[in-house]
Image (spheres, rainbow, N blue to C red):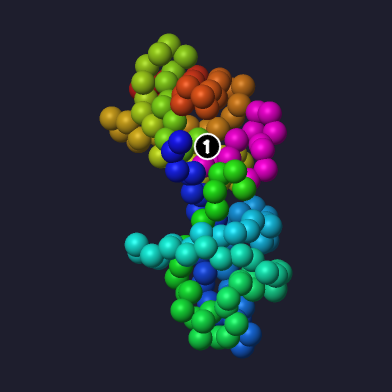
Amino acid sequence: MSEQQHISVGKISGVFGIKGWVKVFSFTDPRENILTYSPWLLKKGDETKTVNVVDGQLQGKTIVAQLTGVNDRDQAASLMGWDIFITQDQLPKAAKGEYYWSELIGLNVETIDGVQLGVIDSLLETGANDVIIVQGERERVIPFLQGQTIINVDLDAGKVVVDWDPEF
């Protein structure tokens, strides 16, 4: 069995108070959702450690969290800059027709005519709609509009079929 896929959900960005709480920069939407996942796998360079979230809250525009074994400001400061990961199975199952970005990255992209465009490298939120960034012989930015530009997403086959002019 392969190792669980780890998903980056945030970063420890500072300390909060004197009792060991940390400030967290969250990549989740909404931001405070990061507090619902425990344990966290913290990574910095080659070092990793697993910590449980004891408590946490939205403090103004900042997320703050209390972690097991972190009881003072110095211990909290030692975690600054560590990246926060969770495992794929900690996420709730996506509704039918909905996908986590982490599931889409790395999928092959081809047109409805079978022309290979490349692989999904990343996604961007533009306000109007999300877009996929496809890296192939060149970079393409394709709107993620299901039923329009996105014809089919097959996670099992690792493929997305798009209605997109390969020349564009």
Q: Is residue 88 magenta?
A: no
Q: Position of residue 149 (x, y in %)?
A: 54, 24
Residue tagged 1: 103
Name above or below for residue 80 compared with residue 48.
Answer: below
Q: Position of residue 130 (x, y in %)?
A: 56, 40
Residue at x-position 48% and y-position 32%: 142
Q: Position of residue 145 (x, y in %)?
A: 59, 29
**Looking at the image, can residue 28 be seen?**
yes
Task: Say which of 73 and 119 sits in front.
Answer: 73
For residue 69, what is the image quadrant? bottom right
Q: Is residue 13 left or right of residue 97?
A: left
**Looking at the image, can residue 84 be seen?**
no
* Magenta stretch: dominant secondary structure: loop
Q: Position of residue 156 (x, y in %)?
A: 51, 24
Q: Residue furthest bottom?
A: 18
Q: Residues within 10 Å of mark 1 (few under 14, many from 20)?
A: few
Q: Residue furthest left?
A: 137
Task: Say which of 139 and 96 sits in front.
Answer: 96
Q: Residue furthest front?
A: 1
Say what secondary structure mark 1 lies in.
Answer: helix
Residue at x-position 61% and y-position 71%: 67
Report the number of numbered marks.
1
Q: Is residue 148 left or right of residue 123?
A: right
Name above or below for residue 58 compared with residue 39.
Answer: below
Residue at x-position 63% and y-position 85%: 19
Q: Amino acid at mark 1?
A: Glu
Span colored in magenta = 91-102
